[in-house]
Image: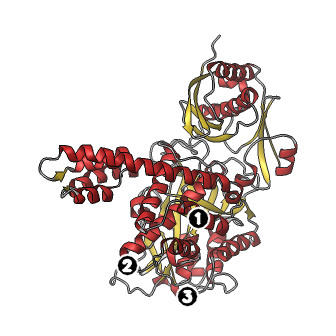
């Protein structure tokens, strides 16, 4: 070590290895979750597979492997250090009631240590397992399986639930212990009690095997699952960084091309000083994430709500730090082009949607310029009220939160006028805002994909009928852009260039209710992608599903590919009522609707 390996090589090595173990390679799901009201983006490799981990059969079988595009945005303000990323790739393999601990641990060891694969020196690896508590026993099985591979006892650690347990996805459901794998770095141990639970840098986590073997009940007890699952995750960027002996993910091939282009456009050198390095990293990370959000087949436009709001924050933060580096207008498209070129083979949707990516970036840069001008006007109003030469923290935060006006610019304008800003008070308001954002980001899965109740199944089925009715009334230009379901209502986003009229909405509602009253069976069939296309099914074929897909047909009315829960007959849905139609983002409309007991 270090061992020279590229991102593309690790991506391919991992999936090929898992294929040799009988796992079927499936493509990455969209970064925008379907029908999950609790998270804005796909946050982990297991996220799109929750229905299958809960028992729905997967079209590709019981052994799977993939590389999932993931986005986590709870720590946007931390990006700029050596390790924080908002977009990352997660390598994974899955057993849906098939192999379990013995195979998963043996394969993990083989992939990590065999010279054909990663070839890590055995003494450079350490492992943790669940120490047990009053709920569930110590995971002595995993401990012994690592020992059987030849792992020394002083490289094995028992740790509590906070370190070695996953789930459940909601309040109840499948969960279980995990075993984590760590690379031992040249950073010295922090003391005699140093372990992978430390954050001293001596141990770097590179892989995690989750063993879903329990079902948590409403009363808080844990009972063994009849059908056990394995879910593993290896962060691609972090692993490449570790294997290549780099100090930062930004020094790996995931970023070198992007950073080189930023350097060309800015005339600055990465690493010149701390402030410049941080600006480079922020622009590189945020532009990569924005490009993947825009380039997704379910891509959204910048807006003031949901995914569009996060996208807008990322682009504007990139523009702001790009301006600091001295880059001129239009640089976002230049950097996005490098990212598309870099990832087009692994994620062809980026090339497919490149025109949309570049168009939206150009529009948002222009909008941000207007925002800055508006912010300056608002600043003047604030400055006119100042009597003691100090702009209070709440006013500064209001400029940031309401107008998107950066605090650094508020400070610069204040300085020009011989004023100061109460940045400590601003920081307090900002911290409260961040805590609320983090609370929202932490509500992973509760009531979302894991919530397969009769209500969500009926509403999910209703989205199919709504989609079909919209295409009949408005034309085939209508395509699903997003779906968000709770037990109370459905929300459906679709591509359409204008407001839908009251008459058109009434006709859509009428068609859906006619399909419900027909009480036709909801017929599920598995078939290959070409067969589904030939038979006229609609859906996102390339980006979400493997070579075999599950289709749902409702009479002659609706025929879609889908992986979610459904009713058995349309008659179970009751009465369909549209509550609201509005704009979601540029070229995308949103309908909110409910179903109620039959109106007879």
Q: Is residue 416 placed above or below 3 in the rendered structure?
A: above
Q: How far from the left and from the top, in percent, is residue 283? A: 48, 65
Residue, disc 3: 2
Residue, disc 1: 334
Label 2 Cα crowd, 10 Å radius (few <14 / some 14-19 / many 20+): few
Q: Secondary structure at mark 2?
A: loop
Q: Secondary structure at mark 1?
A: helix
Q: Is residue 578 placed above or below 273 in the rendered structure?
A: above
Say how the picture is coloured.
secondary structure
Q: Earlier in the sequence, mark 1 or mark 2?
A: 2
- Name the mark on residue 539: none
With 153 as the anchor, is 3 left or right in this view? Answer: right
Q: How far from the left and from the top, in percent, is residue 525? A: 81, 42
- The residue lying at 80 percent from left, 55 percent from top is 547
- Name the mark on residue 273: 2
Q: Earlier in the sequence, mark 1 or mark 3?
A: 3
Q: How far from the left and from the top, in percent, is residue 551? A: 78, 42
C-alpha separation, residue under disc 1 versus residue under disc 2: 24 Å
Q: Is residue 515 placed above or below 564 in the rendered structure?
A: above
Label 1 Cα crowd, 10 Å radius (few <14 / some 14-19 / many 20+): some
> Quarter holding the C terminus?
top right
Q: Earlier in the sequence, mark 3 or mark 2?
A: 3
C-alpha separation, residue under disc 1 versus residue under disc 3: 33 Å
Q: Decide: marks 1, 2 in contact (CB < 8 A)? A: no
Label 3 Cα crowd, 10 Å radius (few <14 / some 14-19 / many 20+): few
The nearer-to-camera label among 1 and 2 is 1
């Amino acid at each position: 070590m270090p061992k020279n390996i590229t991102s593309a090589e690790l991506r391919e090595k991992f999936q090929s290895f898992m294929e040799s173990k009988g796992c079927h390679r499936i493509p990455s799901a969209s970064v925008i979750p379907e029908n999950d009201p609790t998270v804005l983006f796909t946050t982990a490799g297991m996220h799109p597979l929750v229905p299958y981990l809960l028992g729905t059969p997967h079209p590709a079988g019981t052994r799977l492997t993939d590389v999932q595009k993931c986005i986590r945005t709870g720590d946007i303000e931390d990006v700029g250090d050596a390790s924080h990323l908002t977009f990352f790739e997660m390598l994974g393999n899955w057993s849906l009631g098939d192999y379990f601990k013995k195979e998963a641990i043996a394969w993990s060891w083989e992939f990590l240590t065999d010279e054909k694969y990663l070839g890590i020196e055995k003494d450079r690896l350490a492992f943790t397992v669940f120490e047990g508590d009053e709920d569930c026993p110590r995971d002595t099985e995993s401990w012994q399986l690592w020992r059987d591979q030849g792992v020394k006892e002083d490289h094995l650690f028992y740790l509590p639930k906070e370190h070695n347990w996953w789930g459940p996805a909601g309040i109840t459901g499948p969960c279980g212990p995990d075993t984590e794998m760590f690379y031992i770095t040249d950073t010295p141990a922090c003391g005699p009690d140093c372990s992978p639970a430390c954050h001293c840098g001596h141990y770097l986590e590179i892989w995690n095997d989750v063993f879903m073997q329990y079902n948590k009940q409403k009363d808080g007890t844990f009972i063994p699952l009849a059908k056990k699952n394995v879910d593993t995750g290896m962060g691609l960027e972090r692993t490449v960084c570790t294997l290549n002996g780099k100090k930062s993910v930004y020094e790996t091939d995931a970023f070198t091309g992007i950073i080189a282009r930023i350097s060309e456009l800015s005339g600055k050198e990465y690493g010149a000083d701390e402030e410049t390095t941080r600006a480079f990293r922020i622009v590189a990370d945020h532009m990569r994430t924005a490009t993947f959000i825009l380039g997704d087949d379910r891509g959204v436009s910048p807006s003031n709500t949901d995914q569009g709001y996060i996208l807008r924050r990322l682009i504007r933060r990139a523009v702001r730090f790009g301006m600091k580096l001295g880059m001129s207008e239009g640089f976002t498209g230049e950097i996005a082009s490098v990212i598309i070129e870099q990832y087009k083979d692994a994620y062809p949707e980026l090339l497919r949607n490149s025109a949309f990516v570049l168009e939206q970036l150009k529009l948002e840069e222009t909008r941000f310029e207007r925002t800055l001008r508006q912010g300056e006007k608002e600043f003047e109003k604030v400055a006119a009220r100042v009597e003691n030469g100090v702009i209070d923290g709440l006013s500064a935060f209001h400029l940031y939160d309401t107008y998107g006006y950066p605090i650094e610019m508020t400070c610069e304008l204040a300085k020009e006028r011989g004023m100061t800003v109460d940045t400590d008070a601003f920081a307090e308001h900002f911290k409260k805002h961040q805590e609320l954002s983090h609370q929202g980001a932490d509500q992973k899965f509760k009531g979302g994909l894991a919530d397969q109740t009769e209500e969500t199944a009926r509403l999910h089925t209703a989205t199919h009928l709504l989609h079909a009715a919209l295409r009949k009334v408005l034309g085939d230009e209508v395509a699903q852009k997003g779906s968000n379901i709770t037990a109370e209502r459905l929300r459906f986003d679709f591509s359409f260039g204008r407001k839908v009229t009251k008459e058109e909405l009434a006709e859509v509602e009428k068609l859906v209710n006619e399909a419900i009253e027909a009480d036709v069976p909801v017929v599920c069939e598995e078939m290959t992608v070409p067969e589904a296309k030939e038979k006229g099914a609609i859906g996102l074929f390339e980006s979400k599903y493997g070579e075999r897909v599950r289709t749902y047909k409702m009479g002659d009315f609706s025929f879609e590919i889908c992986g979610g829960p459904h009713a058995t007959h349309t008659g179970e849905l009751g009465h369909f009522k549209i509550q609201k139609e509005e704009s979601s983002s540029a070229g995308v409309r949103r309908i909110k609707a409910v179903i109620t007991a039959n109106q007879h």
